[in-house]
Image: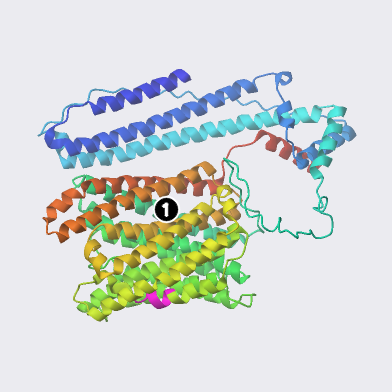
Amino acid sequence: MNTHHCKAKVALIILIFSLSISPVSAQDTSTQKFILLISTFLVFAISISVLIVAKLTKDIVEQFQKSKQQNFERDYDKYFKNLNSDQIEIFLKNKELGRKTETVERTLAIAGLCFILSTTISFGQQPVISEGSLLSQTGIIITIVLISIPVVCGIFLLMFKIMKALRAFRNTQTLSEAEYLTAYLKSLENESLEVSLKIRKQQLDYQLSNNELMGANPASDEKGLIGNIHDASLPFVARKKNALVRPKIDADLTRLVLWYVRCATFWLVFGTSVGEFVGIKFVAPDIDHVSWLSFGRLRPVHTNAVFWGWASLAMLGLGHYVVPRVSNTKLFSINLGWYSLILINTAVFAGTICLMAGINNGGGEYREYIWPVMLLFGVGLALTLINFLKTLARRTTKEIYISNWYIISAIIFAIVISIVAYVPIWQNGLGETIVQGYYMHQGVGMWFMLFTLGIVYYFLPQQLNKPIYSYSLGILAFWTQILFYTLIGTHHFVFSSIPWWLQTIAIVGSVGMVIPVIAGTTNFTMTFRGSWYKIPDSYTLPFFLTGIVFYFTGSLQGTAEAFRTTNLLWHFTDFTVAHSHITMYGIICFLVWAGIYAVVPRLTGIEPPQVTVGAHFWLALIGLMFYTIPLMYGSTLRGLMWMEGKPFIDSVVFMAPFWLWRAIGGSLMWLSHLFFAYNFYKMLVGSGIVDVREAAFAKLARENTLN
């Protein structure tokens, strides 16, 4: 099997080397680079799949050979190590039943299946693409790509089916091993072993009263040695703690919340895949010549898909869990939640098709959807608002917890700003610009930010197992955000023909936003006080902490951008693009991911793979840094070039390296989303691998029940 591994690796290296040394025509460099990139990626992916299948086949063959051993040759002692109390009880009960009935039933199940996968990949020298060759024609390239898509999909589907069959066969072999172990346990006659297991069971069942050392009297701490202990030693590498077992959640609500997150995950992968393609266009602008894939159409597809598809559905899904929990009652109507989910998904799907077909609202960032499409979204929000208000009215708690303040207010503001933006009353002349600034900024601050903060006010104390630091700071942040954020929309149009006094009000409102940002950040960080040691042991708290840090830095960055001097430097540059990703990605996405990782294991009872959760976190964070820092640096220099009166085209050439970093960072972020989708899938279905010991003792438990 190692020989096959080496052959596959050598073949892959030969392919990449042969592609890299192929002659390149000077006039078709970009085309050949594109073909080289796609070919290398496909061959690499297929080779990795073959290696995985080969490794899986090797493990199954070894297991099959092991299953052919005689019963007396099997090493069953390893299964007696670290037995828990329930398994010991099952074993002892089975032995007692066996003595009464004096019957021993041996069940042998030997299944044989051998999969042999041999893949021969032959590579030839890549021909030189001349100036007039077919491969230099855009239509031929598009045709090749379109033909290769179903072929590649078929190959990956075949690999998936093979791995699924191999995994099923491995589980069959595992169950066969469990049958042998069950028969061995039933036939085992060892008095000393039973005595030792009974003693071990007593040891496992023993529980401390928690008063052995301290006694029943309270501790006397005159010098404050106990009360002043705030530090705790941390291991160098610690396994993350699993989610605490919670009371069973309503099955209908669980299904609804999980479907919201499913749909949100789909739109995240789709929307950021479009964004990845758009980012590549900055490096290779001639990668395609299809109108539906043009930059002007795909850019709003990307932003609207991640806004209304990913972030909105994810927030609403978490909201359907949080609102009834903090109200200590059931959700008013599960059906209203399903209606809202269907309407919002329909709106995003129809809006995506319309935008790619060139049907849009005629400008206006984040409101490119035409009004019939946005009407579906608005109706979905209205149904959600009714559902949440009815749930809140049936609460069994006296107070309205602050999470419900934020969440319900966010939905009200989203409906209001949509009406203001789409009802054709104010959109005349400068009114169109003012309404656009109002809608664009309120969408970010009063819909996404308010809703997400409401989620944090529930999940952060829950994950830290302590109350929020200050309820008053939360109320202060809530009302000051409503006061100041609703005024700042026109700070995007400084030095425009909008009245000077209105621009000044927006700048003053931006400065006023320092109050809710500092209040909220202080509230969250002080909630962490005394619990910082929990961060290395948790896979949710790093997401929360990162989102809080970006909440502080990104929001204050927005305040800094609002001043006239900085606006003169940064406006119309990619600094605004970097800022929007720091806020929408660094704040909203990280906090929403934290909420999803906190709630889904409680709903399904299945933990995500901790290694891939770590990969998701670090790829997203590093990718965001690679994306934003070069753009902010390059855009500052570009603004200085404009202020010095240098030619515009010089600034375009100057930005090329920074756009490359943008594409690299975006690729890392996109890759992290694939890890997130995988983690969410694993939280839904689990590993699917059968454990020999668990299967054997489950069989014994069933037999004990029947007897």
Of residue 503 and residue 348, the one placed in the foreground of this image is 503
- The residue carrying pointer 1 sits among few (fewer than 14), some (14 to 19) or many (20 or more) residues within 10 Å by Cα, namely some
Name the residue at the front extreme.
223
Of residue 225 and residue 163, the one placed in the foreground of this image is 225
List x then y, in percent, for residue 49: 42, 32
User: Relative to 608, is 619 on the left or the right?
Assistant: left
Q: Residue at x 19, y 58 (%)?
A: 640
Is residue 486 magenta-colored?
yes
**Amino acid on which the number 1 mark rests in the picture:** Phe
Is residue 115 magenta-colored?
no
Residue 144 in view of the camera: yes
Q: How is the image coloured?
A: rainbow
Name the residue at the right extreme.
100
Which residue is denoted by mark 1 in the rendering?
Answer: 266
Question: Helix, strand or loop at disc 1?
Answer: helix
Q: Residue at x 32, y 65 (%)?
A: 560
**Predominant secondary structure in magenta?**
helix
Q: Is residue 200 above or below residue 564?
A: above
Q: Residue at x 39, y 23 (%)?
A: 8
Name the image quarter holding residue 484. bottom left
Give the magenta range. 481-487
Of residue 175 and residue 220, the one placed in the foreground of this image is 220
